[in-house]
Amino acid sequence: MVALSDRRTHDVSRVSISNGSNNLSICIPLIASLSLARILVVIPVLHLFIATWSTLSFTLTRMPGIARVLHRWARVFFPLIVMWLGYRILKGSGASSLLQSAA
């Protein structure tokens, strides 16, 4: 029960929920537009990427030098990186031109 009252637990929960909703908003339309054969390829690849990123994140945060840099600068750079990724996804999918034509 101590972990539930820890502020860091709530921070991680908020990030996980927001990231999960972001992933759902991208993955559901992607998977809905694919054939069954492509779905059978895409889903294992997505799981492989998640496992790779999780392992890499865990490994990097256990290195003292990198952990210090991440602790100091993550709050500055992480939102910028997420916004850049969102922009690239919108631009690459053609959704940005669709939004411009609707306005």
Image (cartoon, rainbow, N blue to C red):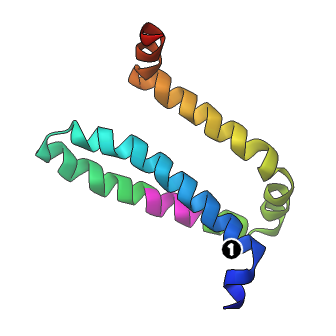
In the depicted structure, whether residue 35 falls above or below residue 74:
above
Judged from this view, the residue extending furthest toward the bottom is 1
Give the residues in magenta: 50-56
Query: Residue 78: horizontal and vertical position, in percent?
Result: 71, 46
- The image quadrant where one finds the N terminus is bottom right
- Does residue 18 lie above or below 2 as drawn? above
The secondary structure making up most of the magenta span is: helix
At label 1, the amino acid type is: Thr
Measuring from the top left, give residue 33's x and y in whole percent.
Answer: 22, 36
66 or 21, which lies in front?
21
Along the line of sight, the residue nearer the viewer: 7 or 34: 7
* Residue 69 falls left or right of residue 97: right
Residue 10 falls in image quadrant:
bottom right
Badge 1 is on which residue? 9
Could you tell whether 80 is left or right of 29 in the image?
right
Residue that appears at 75% across and 68% down: 63
**Residue under the image location 28 percent in, 54 percent down:** 43
The magenta stretch spans residue 46: no
Report if residue 53 lies within the magenta region. Answer: yes
Secondary element type, mark 1: helix
Residue 81 lies left or right of residue 6; in this view the side is left
How dense is the environment of label 1, judged by Cα within 10 Å: few (below 14), some, or many (20 and up)?
A: few
